[in-house]
Amino acid sequence: MLNVLIIDDEPHIRITLKSLIKVACRQVNVVGEADSVESGIKAINTLKPDLVLLDIRMDDGTGFDLLEHFQHVDFKVIFITAYEQHALDAFRFSAVDYILKPVNPEKLVEAIERTRQMVIGSFQSQINILKENLKPENRANRKIVLKTQENIHFLSVSEIICCESDSNYTTFNTVSGERILISRVLKDFDEMLTDYGFFRVHRSHLINLRHIKRFEKLDGGYVIMTGDIRVPVSSRSKDKLLQLFEQIFEL
């Protein structure tokens, strides 16, 4: 049984969450609720929940303020947020779960199910990266959290040379020479990284335009990346890439 605490300053949100959990989430028990940072801290200390559904903006502070009261966060967290779309990228990059207001029942169930696989030990590091990623001045070079079966990697976007798809897995090639295999499809990272200087040159390859060294016309076309990594370019993507290539070298 997963014991859940709801912390949100809007009564109708708390009522909705409790109702949805009761109907749709098996083996989940709502042990209590709170409506502020102060009451939330007390509730966590008293009820010892496994999971906290935590509002970000409350009358007496933020969800981050609440978390800073705990030297060790030994519970899982899903943020409840009404953040604008551009800020939601920061959550995705940080691999921190969130649900949007108004609450979508399917998204709530999916987020709660994902928490069963969450590694608590890495959470504080992810929160620190999330707070950094939310700062406007850090948008151009956000950090991304990559989880493998053995490790959790924290990379700046600029450290990623390219990504390669292999069925349901994606391999990240980094400037350090490390190759990181992630159990997620390339499409997920294409959607995340396109606005940060990445381009899908092939159905199986996503590249960081900042790491292009040259374009070779042989065998249909290849880009040579940092580290002399050779990436094929599809005929469909070639013209667009060459336009971007010219823009890069005009800067």
Image: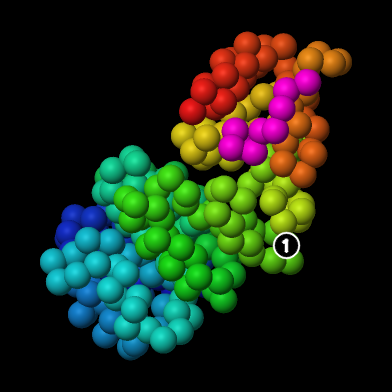
Q: Is residue 220 above or below residue 208?
A: above
Relative to residue 191, is residue 17 drawn left or right?
A: left
Q: Is residue 251 above or below residue 157?
A: above
x, y percent for residue 141: 47, 49
Image point (42%, 78%), residue name = 49
Disc 1 is placed on an element classified as: loop
Judge by depth and name the residue closer to the eye, 222 or 112: 222
Q: Is residue 105 above or below residue 54?
A: above
Query: Hey, which residue is sitting farthest left in the picture?
Result: 59
Query: Hey, which residue is sitting farthest front in the picture?
Result: 250
Residue 94 in sight in this render: yes
Q: Amino acid at mark 1?
A: Gln
Residue 217 shown in magenta:
no
x, y percent for residue 1: 52, 72
- Residue 127 quadrant: bottom left
| Residue pointed to by mark 1 | 149
Image point (45%, 84%), residue name = 72
Residues in magenta, as a range: 208-216
x, y percent for residue 62: 24, 67
Judge by depth and name the residue closer to the eye, 54 or 175: 175
Residue 215 shown in magenta:
yes
